[in-house]
Amino acid sequence: MVPPQSGNGCLLNVMSHILGARQAQKQRTRQALMEAALVLLEHQSLSSLGLREVTRAAGVAPTAFYRHFRDTADLGVALVEEALGGLHAVLRATLAETGDSAVRIDGAVGLIARHVRAYPAHVRFVTRERHGGVERVRAAIGGQLGLFAEEVAAWLGTQPDCARWSEDDVRMLAHVHVDHMVMTASAFLEAGPYGEERVEAAASLARRQLRLIGLGRRHWLD
Amino acid sequence: MVPPQSGNGCLLNVMSHILGARQAQKQRTRQALMEAALVLLEHQSLSSLGLREVTRAAGVAPTAFYRHFRDTADLGVALVEEALGGLHAVLRATLAETGDSAVRIDGAVGLIARHVRAYPAHVRFVTRERHGGVERVRAAIGGQLGLFAEEVAAWLGTQPDCARWSEDDVRMLAHVHVDHMVMTASAFLEAGPYGEERVEAAASLARRQLRLIGLGRRHWLD
DNA sequence: GTAGTCAGTGAACAGTCGTACTCCCAGGAG
DNA sequence: CTCCTGGGAGTACGACTGTTCACTGACTAC
């Protein structure tokens, strides 16, 4: 499991040796602002998130906010980058693994489950703001998910059973997989507070849905 | 196409003869508040929607709001009822129609396309607040979508090709169809401003996705 | 016809909001 | 060492928020 953050605590200590104490401190308060925002966004959406609210939760003066972000929409875009930017490598690595169809399904669902458990606030933010009220953030999320779809499509192109598929159909299947990934993550998030058996039910649901998609894929050219 | 509203203009005129002028006027301003909110919610989310903002757009004094709703979350729940409550009959009628698989797919996608074109603000509201920041509204939408899934599952139970399916698998397939319906509606909404060919591309995508699901369904018990 | 009900009004309340301004002082360059 | 850059603090501003209260006047039940 690779952390999605591009500037977490461990990395910041490294920065203090490379960038100097000045820049390191700046990155630290920037991270504090983003983490505070992430906590607040669990019970509201970005378009209602106040600048003062974030700085108060981060223990910083309101005016300090402007040193890092133009406005809360800017902060939202940064959060998208943090939540999704690091996942491309993970996705590519997961796709590169070979194995039986059932094994792949278990692996993919397990990976999502572990990621949601490790970074619930990031996942909640993405699913909430994917269709949220702030256009720039919506565009940022859509762009990242589009990149995921492209990567999945490129991988599908290398698979023997999709060799004769049209380009549009490959994109369609990639789109389905990315959407399913997001919805599964959201389902895990909703199931979490209701106990482990609900999480396992969500996992079972996701696995059977992937099996359904896989069956459709196998008979697509019939 | 059945209007989702339970109290639109035509119905209000009828009410003035049945309920009296007093109740009819109350329903009219209530409807004005909901429509004003729906307009404002195209560019923001419910958790940032202000009470005064709504009354200003509706041409009503701020305090009049309390005669109809406790708070904006209450208004949101009413909007969910208006957007989704009337669709159960439409869904049931659509399911009752018989026909070839391809014909059914075209019919379902066309129905969604026409509904999005007729009530874009309602659709935007539902997709936006489905994972939005207001818990009561999320719960209301989840409840309605759950009812849709139950109805689809009940219909699937009557289909010959699902006769030997387990109850869980039927629910899984129903869940997939409801999710696909919502995502298709969202795709139509996003495609709308970019021209008709983008809408047709979204429709083509939705049809092929339904074909994929149908193929998986046909070979589920292999 | 009259008395009462009640949707909608207008003023006032204490807060919060985003933003502009000045000031402070630790860190880094020379 | 000194100078200066720049992240952050503090203050102040006008605009806006949700909520309260007393009030008006058209409708309705008797």
Image (cartoon, coloured by chain):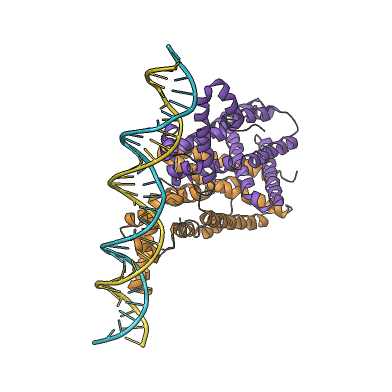
Chain colours: A purple, B orange, C cyan, D yellow
Residue D9 x, y percent position in the rendering: 43, 38
Q: Is residue A152 visible?
A: no
Q: Quadrant of the N terminus of chain A?
A: top right
Q: With respect to residue A139, does B167 lie above or below? A: below
Residue B70 x, y percent position in the rendering: 44, 63
Q: With respect to residue A114, does B25 lie above or below? A: below
Q: Quadrant of residue A121?
A: top right
Lateral position of residue A69 relative to residue A120, left or right: left
Q: Quadrant of residue A83?
A: top right
What residue is at 47 percent from the left and 36 percent from the top? A75
Lateral position of residue B49 relative to residue A105, left or right: left
Lateral position of residue B52 relative to residue A82, left or right: left
Q: With respect to residue A19, does A179 lie above or below? A: below
What residue is at 74 percent from the left and 46 percent from the top? B221
Q: Nearer the viewer, residue B171 or B46?
A: B46
What residue is at 53 percent from the left and 34 percent from the top? A31
Q: Nearer the viewer, residue B30 or B199?
A: B30
Lateral position of residue B156 relative to residue B145, left or right: right
Residue B191 x, y percent position in the rendering: 45, 39
Q: Nearer the viewer, residue B150 or A111?
A: A111
Q: Quadrant of the C terminus of chain A?
A: top right
Q: With respect to residue A152, does B118 lie above or below? A: below
